[in-house]
Amino acid sequence: MEIIDQIIQGMSLYFTFKAVLMVGIGVAAGILVGAIPGISGVMATAILVPFSFFMPPTEGIPFLLGLHKGALFGDSIPAILINTPGQPAAAATALDGYPLAKKGEAKSGIQMALVSSTIGDTFSDIVLILAAVPLAALALKFGPAEFFALMLMGLTIIGGITGSSAAKGILSALIGIMIGLVGFDAVTGAERYTFGIPILQGGVGTIPLMIGLFAVSEVLIQAEKSNKLLSKRPDTAHLKGGKNLKLKEVKTSTRTIIRSSILGTIIGAIPGTGAAIATFIGYGAAKRASKKPEEFGKGSYEGVAASEAANSAVAGADLIPTLTLGIPGSATAAILMGAFLAQGLRPGPELFEANGATMYAIFALLLIGNPIMIVVGWVLTPIFARVVTVRQSLLVPAVLLLCLMGVYVYRGNLADIQVALIVGVFGYLLRKIDIPLAPLVIAFIITPIAERSMKQALILSDGDFSVFLTRPISAGFLLVAVAILYFGFRRKTKNKKSE
Amino acid sequence: MKKIKIIKNIGCILGIVISMGLMANTGLAGKFPTKPIRVIVPTGPGGSTDVTSRLVASVVHQYLGQPMIVMLKGGAAGTIGMAATMAEKADGYTLVFGTGNHTSIVPHVRKVTYDSLNDFIPVFKVNNDPYLIISRSDRFKNFKQLIDEMKANPGKISFGSNGLYGNGHSMILKIELDAKVKFKHVPFKGGGPAIRSMLGGHVDTAGGLFASAGTLGRYKNGSVNILGIAAEKRDKLAPDVPTFREQGVDFVYQLWRGFMAKKGTPQDRIDIIVDALSKTMKDKTFLRLMKAVGSPPNPLHGKEFKNMILAEHKQFGAIFKQVGVTKK
């Protein structure tokens, strides 16, 4: 009965019109700042969090919850409109979102992202509210060996998203691994591929890499066109961003959305894996299962749905393990945890005991935030979609400037802008010879985690490699990895024979 | 033709970058401060240093007459942020908000372009938290049991740290020296993952603060034991936990967070900043926020602050020298 008392108490404290309004304001602020190209959701959260310091908890906490949701979705907007994902997970969204925008279907593309990401978020919110504590116990079973095996499995997923040529996909992934190895070795302290440049000691920054690879290379691609073509309004401009999303498109993607939501929730329950891996696994699985895999990468609504649902299932529900376990699973969650502390909310095991009423109110606000997200997102989408009507000669320089500013804001270092430009030229060359960029990004994200986990596991086992096979969870992941590779190659050879 | 266009466009990009670099800040003479003060925080977002700096900044403007603007310049164990401060003018408009890790540990183990003792003036310490060694309560009851087991099985007991030659690693190096034992050191990326691995039973012990990853709550509900505390006297939060000194390890390390200025900053300007910060430390809103974060202010400035850093720097210098760590 105590629980019911607590729930009622929490509702009366936090479930006011004002609280719901603050969720809405948080969502809108998060979307608007997160949608600036070059400003990632993490950065948007960091910029907006101090506003909550001077709000009473009954307003500050709802604002932060809304902000978290809004900033997360905000990342997908520049990914779709101008091929500039603000964070690695959104790179999967850009794979199909950008071709959609080019076809003149920007509005419905963003709406697909909005709908699928909200469904993914809602699904994982419910699962985690019901099972946060047992899931946290399961997550603790993940030691270094398990992390390594999971990351290795993530790498094999690249096979599914490589596009036309497996060789080019593997080449791209190998480049990603190389870039991922730059910096201090976390275990021995050896410096690798830094050439004595201080900015590279901690590794190539994720934001400069993403901006360089996607935004800067896109600018160079556009620069090839004649001035006449660039100063003309785009062919699809008369569509004004396109039509609204049709129910039919959502319906055909239902299975994909559910699959991605489940995958995202499971992977997201393990803190420290990151949304990028879950997103690419969701995207890869959707492509394998799809009736129209050939449309993936060319503007498939299913592709957008697959990545956005998985992304939000991980990151949207990130707060729940953060609050119950006290260990943030991502950079955004870490920032929000600091802000919660300032509101007198101490994430961790004692939160339920000391602040039970508040916890249930937070859960309720997280859920109610999802329909608010749909409404606010739906209202803002047509405004963003109008970007596709701007002529390239104006849009491209503006985007480049915003992106480079975002790279600078990331950690206030001009050297990061140099990194972004160098990576940009490199990314442009890769695109010219038709090497896909997605495998590079996913390998770049996975490599440091995989390497560190492998070394940690080997320290603990005194150098015995069998540790990866004798631990059941680790062995299971490795088995799945082998299966993915086997079936992947078999399908490739079959396709060749049938041609 | 195409190639020329590409080169032209790269030229445009470089032009933008160079012009951005030329937008240097222009100094103003007269009363201090007449413009916002930039505070460089040499860490990533979300950590206790970042949060503390933002809480100070959110209140101090009332007493300073100008805002403090927090700028995160993380990377390379804080050396990028510290070096960036050195590149600015010594006019009091740029401060760095660092920790003992930046002044007293990192310069011993990494090549740095500055002298953390002589190139910076310690201005004002805001707060500090003692470093702890923790384990699951079903693993070790107390420090003695840990040391006994390590003596029986040398190199078998593992410790998860927040990184190579970081706070936690430095702590166990000292324990190893004074107690004549050997840990199996497993570096993680940050304290959170290390504590999570300890909770999952993958490593035997981990390091951290009371505020790290719900440690205080777990200590209170009995799921973890704090085996030792790197403070001069026992802490009010856990009065039953003996200090390291009580247990034969001469190690005191309070992770402090505070402001420093570049050498050459006029003393009258430093006095104005110290005065505003002293008033902030007594501000009701600030005290409420800091109490909520769980690390109430413990201000220190002037000579006392400087002496504290000197002692700390000496302690870590001696540890790394004895262990034989050379700069990487």
Image: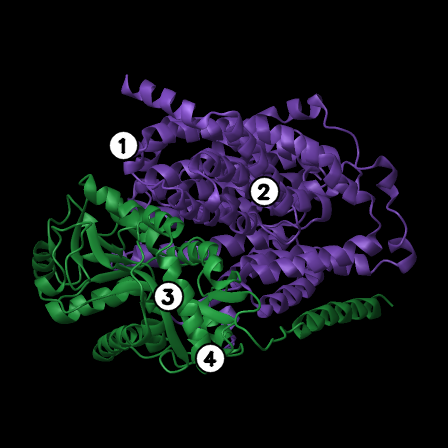
The type of residue carrying mark 2 is Gly
**Where does label 1 land, which residue?**
A353
Residues behind callouts 2 and 4 on a single chain:
no
Q: Color used for chain A?
A: purple
**Where does label 4 land, which residue?**
B265
**Where does label 2 land, which residue?**
A30
The chain identifier of the residue carrying mark 3 reads B
The chain identifier of the residue carrying mark 2 reads A
Which dot, 4 or 1, sits closer to the camera? Answer: 4
Q: Residues within 10 Å of mark 1 (few under 14, many from 20)?
A: few
Q: Nearer the viewer, residue B81 or B123?
A: B123
Cβ atoms at labels 2 and 1 below 8 Å apart: no
Classify mark 1: helix, strand or loop: helix
Which dot, 3 or 4, sits closer to the camera? Answer: 4
Residues behind callouts 3 and 2 on a single chain:
no
Q: Name the quadrant of the C terminus of chain A.
A: top right
